Image: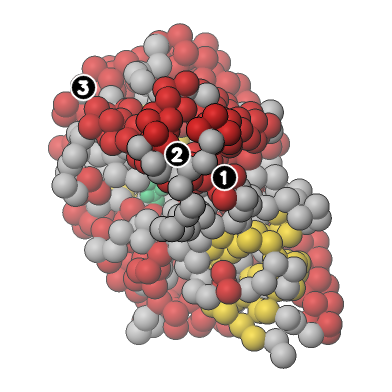
Amino acid sequence: MPRTLSGVGVSPGTVVGPVAKAAPPPALPEQLPPPGDPAAETAAIEAALRAVADDLQGRIAQAAGPAADILLAQVEIVRDPALVEKAGEYLTAGRPAPHAVHAAFNEFRELLAAVGGYLGERAADLDDLRNRAVAHLLGLPMPGLPRPGHPYVLLAEDLAPADTATLDPAEVLAIVTEQGGPTSHTAILAKALGVPAVVACAGVLDLADGETVVVDGVSGAVEVAPEAATVDAVRDAEARRRSAAAAHTGPGRTADGHAVKLLVNVGAARGLQAAADADSEGVGLFRTEFLFLDRAGEPDHAEQVAAYRAVFEAFAGRRVVVRTLDAGADKPLGFVTVPGEANPALGVRGLRTARRHPGLLDRQLAALAEAARATGADVWVMAPMVSLPAEAADFAARVREAGLPTAGAMLEVPAAALRAGALASACDFLSVGTNDLAQYVMAADRMNGELADLLDPWQPAVLELLRQAATAARAEDRPVGVCGESASDPAMALVLAGLGVTSLSMAPVCLPEVRAALRRHTLAECQDLAARALAAPDAATAHAEVQAAARWE
Ligand SMILES: C=C(OP(=O)(O)O)C(=O)O
Ligand SMILES: [Mg+2]
């Protein structure tokens, strides 16, 4: 009998396939036989750590850039002889080998956490390594991605960085997690790789490996044990949808020719070429923090220039909107953010870090300016987490002083969206970060899967604020884009166009369907869809009404 579980769709596409679960962290049994021969127990511990190191080493070859660096650092931790020595002390004190390894890792973890800053942030990585070593000693599968030997739908509680770094889209048909929110990094990564994904799907881990599911990355439905006819219908519909989307190319515009620029979001070096090859009008959000993450200090001028040049050259002839460093909250950075801040999402993050580190921003602007000069690219620069018109004006002055002509502000803070007209007149353009805007409008942590319904960008309150901001920006004759995840939802894209948004920036894989949706509707129809969403009593109704009223073929 088919049955349906429901979660939140975060990366579009519908697929059918057998599930395979990422092995959960091992439960450490309280009672185990006391250690036997110390030499044999020590050898078992060494073998477990070697197995973990070899497994990670094997993944380095498949990873690239910062992901490979993270894995390399983890291999070094596991190979540290001090770890075996520390576990040996616990063995001597009478602890069985799995307990001894567990305790040794925990001791290292506490040391790192006490140091704080960059090293403190690496402390959580030790838990993943500890779990892998303990699983090996207990004869359990190593936590992490399964390897069933055929393409599968990956089920997990949430994904660890080591897993997301090496996930192969040719093997993983879709991702379904029990935890995670719509703007969690699992969601962003899935979309960047073009893998359909559903998060916050309660009960999905109760499925047995090999069971067949249909995953709908838009509605969030996960149908278990579908009828053969459903499987055929899903495969046909997906093929039809893809070919309809592929039928349109070129700049974004509605059926009556109203332009809505279609841009891509770019992050790590991984995927840059694929992003550049996509049929887009440029980059609407270049997240530069990937260059700063997982390192002990700021990249120097030459390194920054080289990284920015790579993106500008890949998009030669097209606009590139660069976001300056957005450190803090969901993107902590040891050498920039404030350690132990009680409430980092409301703390010194984004542009606010320039209060403490003005040089960091100016050095980044200088490197961007040099890369722009060297490539002749059309570079626009914007600041994240702007709250005040005065901040936008100050940022724009610094951008121009650095020799870059076009400065903008992101609308992520409700105060900024409410005063969008004043912000717009203080700079050259605005870009709405709906991931953070929804978080702050709804007072719901974007990393908290339990609150996914509140965080939904279809919340009429979020849409109402967006309407006001877009209207105010247009009154100032300034472009206003959307670069949060909601821009990649074809139904939402119609609403955003109807609200007056002038560009939409998204993962490259989402472009064809958004482009096709715009081409099927006139601006007046988009405005009508926007009015329906705004008048809806709640997010689910807004989404359902627009989905039903729009034309999809
Ligand atoms: C685009 C956004 O920025 P990030 O997801 O990187 O915070 C956003 O907040 O919508
Ligand atoms: Mg943001």
Q: Residue at x 44, y 12 (%)?
A: 370
Q: Secondary structure at mark 3?
A: helix
* Residue 100 x, y percent position in the rendering: 42, 40
Q: Nearer the viewer, mark 3 or mark 2?
A: 2
* Residue 322 x, y percent position in the rendering: 43, 32
Q: Point out the tag, 1 or 2, that comes first from the N-terminus.
A: 2
For the N terminus, the image quarter is bottom right
Q: Residues within 10 Å of mark 2 (few under 14, many from 20)?
A: many
* Residue 495 x, y percent position in the rendering: 48, 67
Cα–Cα span, label 1 and label 2: 9 Å
Q: Residues within 10 Å of mark 1 (few under 14, many from 20)?
A: many
The amino acid marked with disc number 2 is: Val
The residue that disc 1 covers is 137
Q: Point out the tag, 3 or 2, that comes first from the N-terminus.
A: 2
Cα–Cα span, label 3 and label 2: 44 Å
Q: Residue at x 47, y 13 (%)?
A: 303
Q: Residue at x 51, y 55 (%)?
A: 26
Q: Point out the tag, 1 or 3, that comes first from the N-terminus.
A: 1
Q: How many marks?
A: 3
Q: With 340 as the anchor, is 378 left or right in this view?
A: right
> In the image, is residue 465 above or below residue 262?
below
Closest to the observer: 229 or 136? Answer: 136
Q: Residue at x 28, y 30 (%)?
A: 111
Look at the image and tell me whether residue 326 can be seen.
Answer: no
The residue that disc 3 covers is 358
The residue that disc 2 covers is 101
